[in-house]
Amino acid sequence: MKITAIKTYPVNIAGRSQLNVKVETESGIYGWGASGLTGRELAVIGALDHFRPLLIGKDARNIGAIWQDLYRGQYFEGGRVLTAAISAIDMALYDIKGKALGVPVYELLGGKQRDYVECFASLRFSSKEELINRAKILIKEGWKMLRLAPAEYEEGKYASTFEPRDSIAIIAEWLTDLRKEVGTKPVIGIDYHHRLTVAETISFLQRMPVGTIDFIEEPIRDETPETYETLRKMTNVPFAIGEEFASKWQFLPYIERGITQFARIDVCNVGGITEAMKVASMAEAHYIDLMPHNPIGPICTAATLHVAAASPNFSWLEEMNTHVENPGLDDANYYPIQPQIDGTRYKLSDTPGLGVDFNEELALKEGFKMVEAPRLKKEDGSFTNW
């Protein structure tokens, strides 16, 4: 089953950018993949332009060998741009193989270990009232786990001011009040989106009673595992880390040293389904559960569902499309076939392949414009992380 074409479709959906990749074969069977490097779609397309002549004519069924060729086939291997491109190709090849064999992708990964994939609700908020009201709505609808994303800065504005010390003072107070309002049963975590330092993170956690939050996600940047290891020793609050990691090697120190308690794996960035399953096995050996990153669109969701289905050490899948926060990234006009959430979970489908399709004609018609992530600055004008 030889590969005949690699097609790229950068697209703007709901004000954000996505990059979907189609791999076609001589049999007429095609597969879809997606890049997770949001905001740098053209860089990933450039990598795919390099990969295309290497892929044309290869047997699409040899997924593992193709992964090794794409990763090792240059002197400067790895990096987020290359692995985002590899991720998209890898996912598409699994989609093709599943369709060719008439089975869902999870059957290629050892079969499903659960009947459904439970999700957590992503909840953005910019005031205490908004936080508590939205949380109560979600809990009433049956959500057992909430991942909070504070946006107390001027959300929607390209450049906004963010002072970490001001932020941790008010967010700690709001979360303490939230826990009093909703009780001890809901699982509550917070994503500080690597905006803090080690000292600021500890200061934030010490301002709240024990049990206020069940985990904190990526409070600091992750380039230096030793720094995170220091932070790990200073608090007993579990960490969720890994959405930016682009290989099993980046995950390795965080897993082996017990730095993270949840692996925030992103199938569209880490190297696709092939690499995701290897990270899942590494995490399983250290009793670490997967909490996959899923902020892009239905192709990423579909691929992640299959990884979650086949992995014994899975906790929750990120879900942004809820009644209180629905950015529209799953627009049915672009994705006529996609996984459908049922309440707070996805039931696993027996559709062959990934179980998703994309409207190429609409993507070509609408065109593409580059979208930049917001920028945050401190009051003195210096940049900080968004």
Image (cartoon, rainbow, N blue to C red):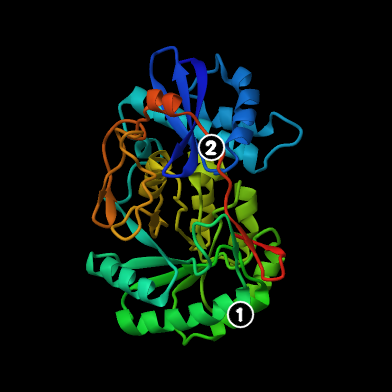
Type of the residue with mark 1: Ile
Residue at (69%, 28%) from the top-left corner?
Answer: 73
* Quarter of the rendering occupied by the C terminus: bottom right
Type of the residue with mark 2: Ser
Residue at mark 1 to residue at mark 2: CA–CA distance: 35 Å
Looking at the picture, tell me which residue is in the foreground, 4 or 173: 173
Q: Residues within 10 Å of mark 2 (few under 14, many from 20)?
A: many
Element class at badge 2: helix
**Is residue 245 in view?**
yes
Mark 1 or 2, nearer chain start: 2
Looking at the picture, tell me which residue is in the foreground, 326 or 46: 326
Report which residue position mark 2 lands on: 87
Instruction: Judge whether 97 appears above or below 182 on screen.
Output: above
Q: Residues within 10 Å of mark 1 (few under 14, many from 20)?
A: some
Report which residue position mark 1 lands on: 202
Instruction: Judge whether 1 appears above or below 200 on screen.
Output: above
